[in-house]
Image: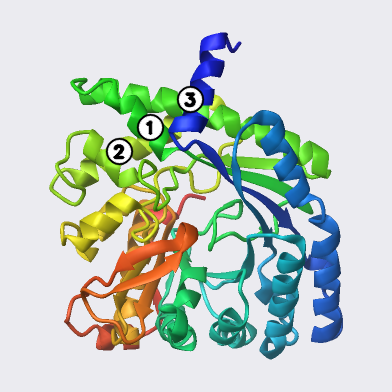
Amino acid sequence: MFNKFDVLETIEMIEKEHLDIRTVTMGISLLPCIRATAKETAKTVYDTVMKKAERLVATAEGLSREFGIPIVNKRVSVTPVSLITAAFPEKSGLVGKALDDAAKELGIDFLGGYSALVQKGTADYEEKFLRTIPEVLSATNRLCSSVNVGSSRSGINMDAVRLMGEIVKETAARTASSDGLGCAKLVVFCNAVEDNPFMAGAFHGTGEADTVINVGVSGPGVVQHALKFVPDADLTDAAELIKRTAFKITRAGQLVAKEAAKRLGARFGIVDLSLAPTPARGDSVAHILEELGLSVVGCHGTTAALAMLNDAVKKGGVMASSRVGGLSGAFIPVSEDIGMIESATAGNITLDKLEAMTCVCSVGLDMIAIPGDTPATTISAIIADEAAIGMINNKTTAVRIIPAPNKKVGDEVSFGGLLGRAPVMPVHSGDSSKFIGRGGLIPAPIHSFKN
């Protein structure tokens, strides 16, 4: 039972510590939308999203007023579009445009699912679909794309990894006037999950119900504020405090998720309790790590502190709800976290250190700007490294990287809003092209054989 102190504490979390529901995301199956032609399919897709999500924004805003909890984003995820357009992959852009139009009409912030799952091999129709991504992302505003290139069960599809390096480069070039903004809407996964409510990686899994509500909760500021009261606690007690705080945050998310699903006639899916930061001061995962005793994020001890934080968040969330899912943990996007921005600008955190941190956090190398002249093969190699971490450790990893056109190390890119800004970071000058050019499949690890 909640008492008056719990209520007052939650109010303070919202008013002073940046607690919010980062997203209410409606997952919609598009499988019933497949028609004989691309044009007919696109129209049916548009009509389906318009009908299913017509009350999403109004419902979320009503719940926000009713419960007094800010709901920042209203989003939609759909069945991977490569499955819907398999009969006419070259015309997949028509479906992408229809989805973007529906999102704009409904006031949806982002719509995810212009996606493909190619972890074990790339069918001809999927390769044709992948090659449409740069043009589609440059021609749309709210549509997001993701590609799963590996898994712990199947290994890493290095042919897809090689192609994705080229696609990231082309997407940046096509959106050069906005510092390569298209790449901020494109993420490459290993072990992608089907119930992720966060962009750019959300898609609606084929094993889900027709319509599902997944909620993402965010509270870095709440965790940092709580730690200020125990400056001399040992790490066992600090972890316990983080766990209890995550419990409270997750309960708030479950309340909103269940009520939203009920009002929208959808299934309640999961609560994703990821600590998703913003560029606002007081809402930073980096600052949580510094509150634990690091002089600056990126110094020695950063990976250990992040591991403890991520684990404590997951433990608290699992105790609070039987429907915890998605990515759930701590995000470390550079451009979307004021502490990460400042550390990267000062040279205190590097791409190599960020890669090490991805071994223990949620997702991976996220919203990192690199020089625009970085070779596609180097980008592919960065993707391969992250996929290997995910495959071997049986966790989700991802790369959302921006080769900023006409920018060099020390320059800055700026996207505004939640996407923030980031310094252009150096990459290793060594050549990975021969390794990437080998192609093929990196076999699944020995521990994948569990049947």
Say which label, 1 or 3, has the lower sequence index: 3
Say which label, 2 or 1, has the lower sequence index: 1
Query: Label 1 near label 2: C-beta < 8 Å?
Result: yes
Image position, residue 360 (x, y; %): 32, 47
In the image: residue 345, left or right of residue 254: left
Q: Residue at x 80, y 71 (%)?
A: 45
Residue 352 falls in which quadrant of the image? Answer: bottom left
Circle number at residue 223: 1
Q: Nearer the viewer, mark 3 or mark 2?
A: 3
Q: Is residue 265 visible?
A: yes
Q: Residues within 10 Å of mark 1 (few under 14, many from 20)?
A: many
- Location of mark 3 (residue): 12
Look at the picture and state if 309 lies above or below 241: below
Amino acid at pointer 1: Val
Image position, residue 312 (x, y; %): 37, 31
Residue 94 falls in which quadrant of the image? Answer: bottom right
Circle number at residue 288: 2
Q: Nearer the viewer, residue 268 or 1?
A: 1
Q: Residue at x 53, y 24 (%)?
A: 11
Alpha carbon distance from label 3 to label 2: 18 Å
